Image (spheres, rainbow, N blue to C red):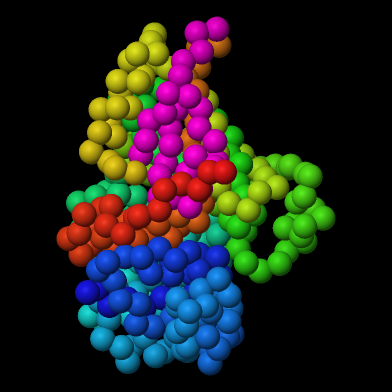
Amino acid sequence: MIKVGIVGATGYTGSELVRLLYNHPEVDIRIITSESRKGELFSDVHPHFQGLADHELQPAHKILEEDLDAVFLALPHGVSMSFVEKYTGADFRVIDLSGDFRLSAPDVYESWYAKAHTFPKGFEQAVYGLPELHREEIRRSRLVANPGCYPTSAILGLAPLVRANMIIPGQIVVDSKSGVTGAGVKAKPTTHYSNVSDNFKAYSLKHHRHTIEIEEQLSELSSNEALQVQFTPHLLPVDRGILSTIYTQPREGVTENQLKALYAAFYKEHPFVRLRKNPPALKDVRGSNFCDLFVTYDERTNRIITVSVIDNLVKGAAGQAMQNMNLMFGLEETTGFTAVPLNP
């Protein structure tokens, strides 16, 4: 059994990690931590786990007293880095679900996250945890930086086009919509019921911190030049899910059949990417680790349109983290993923 610990499990991502790992046949959840709720039961914080996961929440320093194989950090940006530094040299592997090690360097992080990075050496160890691009590096890694939810949907939607050098680099538009769980469990004015219900809005135009994550990963795939992305996120009045509609312009003539064949070849060895015959909806992936993609070509506007749908808490966070854990410990990528998407 893989003995795991979860640091910071009182938020939505931590709860989702426990839900997924509970059903994993090779995992033993040994410790769950919370600084603010220590001493309480995990099932007191998340009542739907009553009788299933009644672990007493421990302070984070107790992690080092356990004999663990893997630790998941479900902590806010800017907090994880100190834990990664503290755990350097420990016997267990770390999967960090924050953004602290997703980017290429500390100065890039500081520019987009507007805070100092206190453990620059972590960037030398971290592997970007998108299995569809970095499977072999993830297998060997001891520190995986789990991708952001928006970048997961955008990168998977664009990767085949970028790798094939098929699109004009400066003409990429990613229009994404997310459920409110992407904002975290803590209440904020923008996520109050009265602001979200029966409403729909764009936010963080031009400078959302996931923009650089998308650009860096796609630029690594590009054989010619760095890519720029016009990324605009929107808040949907739903609890979970991300739908990204992506617009690109081909360098030269392309057909619908060429696009379908390109995506099929790129993702043929990746079990969690499904290519759809029609544009997918949020409920097609709800509760699952799938990314559903649909690609088409608009001859009238000479644009490729790609629709990418994920559950932001699963493939966009906890599910991808468990997928990475499977790779790190030599298991089949699909191990433990028993849930069929919940629709309706």
Q: Is residue 211 visible?
A: no
Quarter of the image where one finds residue 227: top left
Q: Position of residue 297 (x, y in %)?
A: 46, 15
Residue 252 higher or lower than 328, as above or below:
above
Residue at the right extreme? 194
Depth check: 338 or 250 in front? Answer: 338
Depth check: 56 or 71 in front? Answer: 56
| Residue at image location 62% in from the left, 67% down from the top | 185
Q: Position of residue 73 (x, y in %)?
A: 42, 71
| Residue at image location 50% in from the left, 69% down from the top | 15
Task: Count numbered badges in the picture.
Answer: 0
Q: Position of residue 238 (x, y in %)?
A: 66, 49
Q: Is residue 35 shown in magenta?
A: no
Q: Position of residue 95 (x, y in %)?
A: 35, 66
Residue 240 higher or lower than 218, as above or below:
below
Q: Is residue 292 shown in magenta?
A: yes
Q: Is residue 333 visible?
A: yes
From the image, which quarter does the N terminus lie in? bottom left
Magenta region: 273-300
Q: Is residue 75 left or right of residue 223?
A: right
Residue 73 higher or lower than 40, as above or below:
above
From the image, which quarter does the C terminus lie in? top right
Residue 166 higher or lower than 332, as above or below:
above
Quarter of the image where one finds residue 221: top left
Depth check: 15 or 214 in front? Answer: 15
| Residue at image location 63% in from the left, 53% down from the top | 239
| Residue at image location 45% in from the left, 55% down from the top | 314
